[in-house]
Amino acid sequence: MKNTKLLISLVACMAIFVSVVGIKPSVSKAASSHDPVIYVHGTGGNSTNFFAIKSYLKSQGWADNELYAIELIDKTGNSYTNAKQLATYVDQVLKKTGKSKVDIIGHSAGGINTLTYILNTGGTKVNDVVTLGSPNRFITSTAPVGKDSNHKILYTSIYSSSDYLVPTWLSNLKGAKNVQLSGIGHLGLVANSKVNELIKAGLNGGGQNTN
C-alpha cells in the first residue's frame, strides 16, 4: 500500500514538473517577441553598417528574423527616391514576419529618408523610430505623429556635439526624446555601447512624442 501511494506521489510530481517545463518555452517566446527592426543607412553607406547594432540587439534578445537592413539603391541620400524604396521594403518585411508594424533605425540621411517615408505614407506601419546623427530638420522640425488614431509614433533622436558633419540643432526634433552625447563622431554613432543602450530603450517604447 505504501509503495502504491509512493508511486502515485512520484507520478503526480513528475506530471507537475513536466507541465511547468512545458509552459516555460511559450512564455519565453512571448517575452522575446519584438516588432521587426529596419536599419536605414546614410549617404554613401550600406546595409553592413548595421552589423554592430545588430550584434548588440541579438545579444539583448532580438532574433535574426526580427532584424533587417535595407540596401538603398540611391546612395546619395535622396529622400524622395529612398522613401519610396523604404515603403516597399517595409511592406516586404511585414509580409515576411506577419507583423503589423515595424521599428526603424535611421543613421544620418537614413533618418530623413525615414521621416519622408512617414510623412508620405502616414506612418501607420511604424511604432518606434530612432535616428542617429540625422539632419532631421531638413525634412521637419516636429516629430510626425502619424495617422494611426490609436498610436503615436515614438521617436528617439540621438546625436553628438562631436559630430562635425551634422550640427546638433539639425538633429533636435520637437516632441521627440532628444539625447545629446559628446565624444562620439558621426560614424561612431553606429558602433558605440552607450548609443546601443539608447537604441534598445527607443525600440522598447522608450521614445517620446508630445505633439
Image: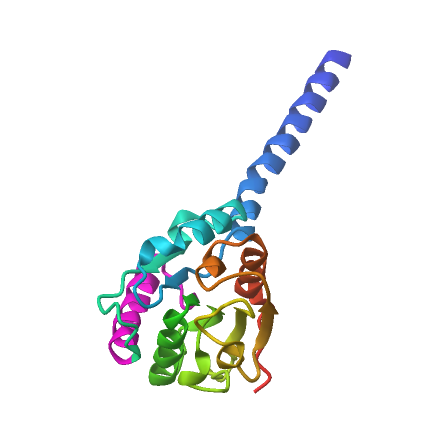
Q: Is residue 112 above or below residue 26?
A: below
On-image quarter of the N terminus: top right
Task: Please give left or right for residue 4 compared with residue 181 in the image.
Answer: right
Extent of the magenta region: 80-104
Taking the image as shown, residue 40 lies to the left or right of residue 192, namely left
- Among all residues in the image, which is located at the extreme left? 73
Residue lying at 26% horizontally and 67% vertically, measured from the top left? 75
Q: What secondary structure is the magenta-colored segment mainly?
A: helix
Q: Is residue 151 visible?
A: no
Which of the 4 image quadrants contains residue 9?
top right
For image coordinates 34% across by 53% down, the residue present is: 48
Whether residue 83 is in magenta: the answer is yes
Residue at (28% x, 73% y) in the render? 82
Frontmost residue, 183 versus 201:
183
Q: Nearer the viewer, residue 59 or 174?
A: 174
Q: Quadrant of the C terminus?
A: bottom right
Q: Quadrant of residue 77?
A: bottom left
How many discs mark residues in the rendered view? 0
Residue 83: % across, % down: 30, 76
Against 152, residue 59 (above or below) is above
Q: Judge by depth and name the residue closer to the eye, 91 or 139.
A: 139
x then y, percent, for residue 152 = 52, 80
Indicate how the structure is coloured in the image.
rainbow
- Residue 41 in percent (x, y) is at 35, 64
User: Is residue 17 visible to the viewer in this orientation of the structure?
Assistant: yes
Q: Quadrant of residue 196?
A: bottom right
Rendered residue at 42%/60% (across/down):
37
Residue 58 in the image: state x and y as whole percent: 48, 47
Q: Nearer the viewer, residue 36 or 59?
A: 59
On whether residue 155 falls in the magenta region, the answer is no
